[in-house]
Image: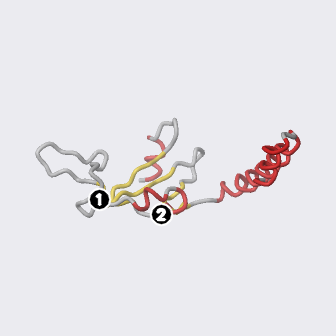
Amino acid sequence: AKRWLDLFKRDRVKSDVKQAWDIYYSVFTRINSQLPGLTHLELPFVSPPLQEARNLDLAVPGSYRAGQPVVRIARFVSSIRVLSSKQRPRRITIVGSDGINYRFLLKGHEDLRQDERVMQ
């Protein structure tokens, strides 16, 4: 695909862009067909910066208590679970500076309450 785009940059022939697009679309359809069976994601592949993050100055969401020490994000667990409900939300685990694992549900533009019940 890169070769086709380089040709387009050089010669400005629109059919070269179509050739590159066909390759990209083919890859997209193959990946898209495999997604429904996916149950886990590995953080190093989907977000290397989160995998490498350590001892952040950010509090674990929902953990702040007035008058108590702030529980900070120590690291992210490298395996992300993909739940099998309709919208396929992701469950991540954050390890707090207190050593406790905190689980969170990630989902775009949806109501999380039903999936939260499934997760329990």
Residue at the spot 51% in from the left edge and 36% down from the top edge: 110
Residue at the spot 41% in from the left edge and 53% down from the top edge: 120
From the image, tell me which residue sits under label 2: 79
Q: Is residue 20 left or right of residue 72?
A: right
Q: Are marks 1 and 2 in contact (CB under 8 Å)?
A: no
Going by the numbered disc 1, the residue's amino acid type is Asn
Distance (Cα) linking label 1 and label 2 = 18 Å
Q: Is residue 78 above or below residue 62?
A: below
Q: Residue 103 location, x and y as percent?
A: 38, 54
Residue at the spot 54% in from the left edge and 55% down from the top edge: 82
Residue reaching furthest left?
67
Mark 1 or mark 2, earlier in chain: 1
Q: Residue 102 location, x and y as percent?
A: 33, 56
What is the crowding at mark 2: few (fewer than 14 residues within 10 Å), some, or many (at least 20)? some
Q: Quadrant of residue 14?
A: top right
Front of the two marks 1 and 2: 1
Q: Residue 40 location, x and y as percent?
A: 55, 61
Q: How is the image coloured?
A: secondary structure
Task: Identify which residue, 7 or 90, lies in the foreground.
Answer: 7
Going by the numbered disc 2, the residue's amino acid type is Ser
Q: Residue 54 location, x and y as percent?
A: 33, 60
- Counting every numbered tag in the picture gives 2
What is the crowding at mark 1: few (fewer than 14 residues within 10 Å), some, or many (at least 20)? few
Find residue 91 and name its label.
none
Q: Secondary structure at mark 2?
A: strand
Residue at the spot 80% in from the left edge and 52% down from the top edge: 23
Q: Is residue 54 above or below residue 106?
A: below
Q: Is residue 20 left or right of residue 119?
A: right
Q: Secondary structure at mark 1?
A: loop
Task: Identify which residue, 48 or 94, lies in the foreground.
Answer: 48
From the image, tell me which residue sits under label 1: 55
Q: Is residue 1 left or right of residue 84?
A: right
